[in-house]
Structure formats: structure tokens, C-alpha cells
Amino acid sequence: MDAAFTAEQHEIRRTLRELLVTHCGPGEVRAAADTAPGYDEALWHRLARELGLPGIALPEAYGGVGCGTAELALACEEAGRALLPSPLLATSVLAAPLIARLGTEAQRTALLPRIAGGTLTAALAVPGGSLATALGLTGDNAGGQWAGGGRAGGIQARPDDGGGDGGWRLYGEAAQVLDGHSAGLLLVAAHAGGFPRSRTLLFLVPAASASGLVRTRQTSMDGTRALARVELRDTSAELLGADDTTDAAGALAATGRTVAAVLAAEAVGAAESALDRTVAYAGEREQFGRPIGSFQAVKHRLADLYVQVQAARSAAYYAAWDPAAGGLALAQALEALRVTTSEAIQLHGGIGFTWEHEAHLYFKRAASDELLFGPVHRLRDHAARQAGLFAPDTTGRGVAV
């Protein structure tokens, strides 16, 4: 493994950081999050036009840049530093890889170039607010219990026999859908076949033309992560893939490993930015005639945070090279982000406790990410089970070590 980044990768980081420093300060972040789509559409189109950001990890044959997970992770690290409100996570990290993995050639040709060009955004809708389980981050997703298991609840799919075009009809509800209120395309995980032959499939729902689709933006802890409730009331949909034998759960789990690696890098970027701002404040704020950063107790706390952030960065970069390590890297990065942002509020003193201070933007990101993709102890527990660290239980009393 060559751990050094290439000149091209350094250029991606530098160019994106310069653009976001100019156009994505705390004031711009709050203003963008308060808009109807939840992000600055003009900035998103500029990132697509000048940097090819939405398609950075898509093949050139479909209009993408042709890079890989490492470049996407670097881009998301910079987005995390600025807390950039954008459809990057929902569209390019969650939805696009599923279309590329499962879609027919006609579906890939019709959708991926529009995603790469920034003219189409997408969102992954899974029922029950169980995104972490659906992606195989905190548990095994093969059984489909996270999606209702074919029983009442979840989202149900049935063939549209009256249409004669091989379409499907969806009925159900999904909550906490990232960018679900504004995405032009929804990828919906639904059960088909009823309880005896229950299986999870993915469906394409074009938001502009779908009947019976109701989308409501929800109030979220982190305003830079727009969430929505998606209701499907006998909504027409197209199956993602050639037939209903596709392994949707396997594709979600494979995508989840990459998602974890990219999210880890994003969390590291946010943690480093929060730490940098805290170090700068400690050098400016004076107490007893000297900067508070000169006191040994403060130095030790900042040094501990620095070590934790750098360790999380190493884990995130390794996971970008080997996504199989994504779950553990994400756990370490989310923990580093939580601890760093908590300490940032403490070390900013009285001003840090005011709701309007930028430290709270980072703290809310930490709390929101752990609720959506964690918690940390479940990420670690699932990774340990996958690695075979726990012996099978033969006593019926619990898992043996």
C-alpha cells in the first residue's frame, strides 16, 4: 500500500478547500440550510461544472470523472470541514453507486450522466428510519427485518398488472430520508412477494412525475443534513435492475462499506475544523493577562484532541483504500467528532454555550451523524462480529468470547 496521495488528489483537496473557504462560511452555511432545498443550488451547480464533484467517483463512460473512493473521501473531508450543505452524500455516495451496481444499461445511461452533471439529485429512502441497518453498518441487513420483514409496516411493492409495462406500485412510508424533500429521483427500498416470499428490492421513483408521492421536510437536529418523510400512496415505480432476482440487500451492504469510509473522512474533516477553530480561539482569548492556550491544562486537552483526530484520519484514509475497514473507521471518526466538538464548546467558555455560535454547528453534526449512522458502540459490535471475534453461543445464555 502506498499511503502517499498523488498530485491529482492533492489538487482536488486544494481546489475544493479554496472554493469552500470563500463561499461556505458559517453565515453562508446557515443561510443555505434555511432555503427550501436545504442547500445553495448555485454553489452546487458550480461545484458540478468546475470540479465535476457529483460524478467524481462515477465512470467516465457515464459522464463522471473516473476517480475512486479515495478521491471521493478527500472531497467529502473538505465538505465536512466546511459543513457544506449539499446533495453530495445522498446523491453521489448513497444513490449513484446503487444505480451503477444494480441498474440496467438503459437505466445507467439515462440517470448517471445527469447525476454526474449536477442536474439530477437522488435520495435513498428506506423505511423505519433504519439507514444504518439497511446499509449493513450496525447489523446484518439480509433478513430484511429493518424494512418490515414483509409484515405490516415498511414499504410494500406489487406488480402493476393493469399497466402492462412491467411496472410496480408502492405503498408505505419512509422517515429520515436524506434530501428526500428535494431530490429529483428517489431510490426506494420496498418488500415484494408478501410474507411467504418476502424479499427486498430497490425501485426508481421520479419525484416530478410520480402520483401519490408526498414529501415533507422534517425538523432535524443538524440543519445542514436535510431530512424528509416520504409517503408513497399507490405510487408507480420502476424496478432497479433487470428483474426481481437482484440481490438488493447485498448491493446495499457493499455500498454501505464505501459509505462508511467516506463518512469517516467527512467526520474527520469536521473534527479537524472544530479543533482548528478552538486552537485559534485559545490563542486569542486572554485570562489573567495571558492567552488561555498558554495554560498547561488547556494545552493537554488540545493535545489529546489532536491525537484523537489524527488517529481517526489514519483510520479513515485506510478505509478509503480498503472499504472493508469502513465500519471501524466510521466508529473512530464519529467518536473523535463527538469528543472534539464537545470540548470545543467547553473551551470556548461562555460564548461557546450560546446557540448562535458556530461551535454548535459542529456539535449538532456530531450528534446527528451518530443518530443516523451509529451509534459508535453498535458500529464496533457489528464490525467485531463480522471479524469473528465472538465465538458462537452454544449455551443459550449469550454470545461467548
Image: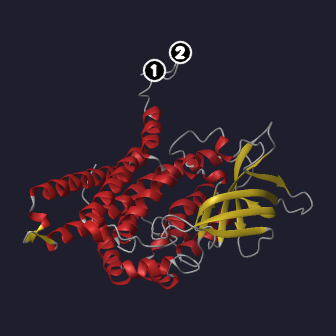
Cα–Cα gap, marks 1 and 2? 8 Å
Q: Residue at x 50, y 85 (%)?
A: 42
**Of helix, strand and loop, which one carries label 1?**
loop
- In the picture shown, does residue 237 fall above or below 2? below
Which amino acid is tagged 1? Ala
Left or right: residue 226 compared with residue 202:
left
- Residue 244, numbered label: none
Q: Quadrant of the C terminus?
A: top left
Which amino acid is tagged 2? Thr
Left or right: residue 14 compared with residue 375:
left
Whole-percent x and y of residue 150?
76, 43
Comparing 378 with 48, the one in front is 378
Identify residue for label 1.
400
Q: Quadrant of residue 342?
A: bottom left
Q: Residue furthest top?
A: 395
Q: Residue furthest right?
A: 162
Q: Residue at x 68, y 66 (%)?
A: 106
**Of helix, strand and loop, which one carries label 2?**
loop
Whole-percent x and y of residue 83?
40, 70
Contact? badges 1 and 2 (CB < 8 Å): yes
Mark positioned earlier in the residue sequence (1 or 2): 2
Identify residue for label 2.
394
Local packing at callout 2 (Cα closer than 10 Å; few below 14, some 14-19, many 20+) is few
Whole-percent x and y of residue 26?
37, 77
Whole-percent x and y of residue 355?
40, 71
Q: Residue at x 80, y 68 (%)?
A: 212
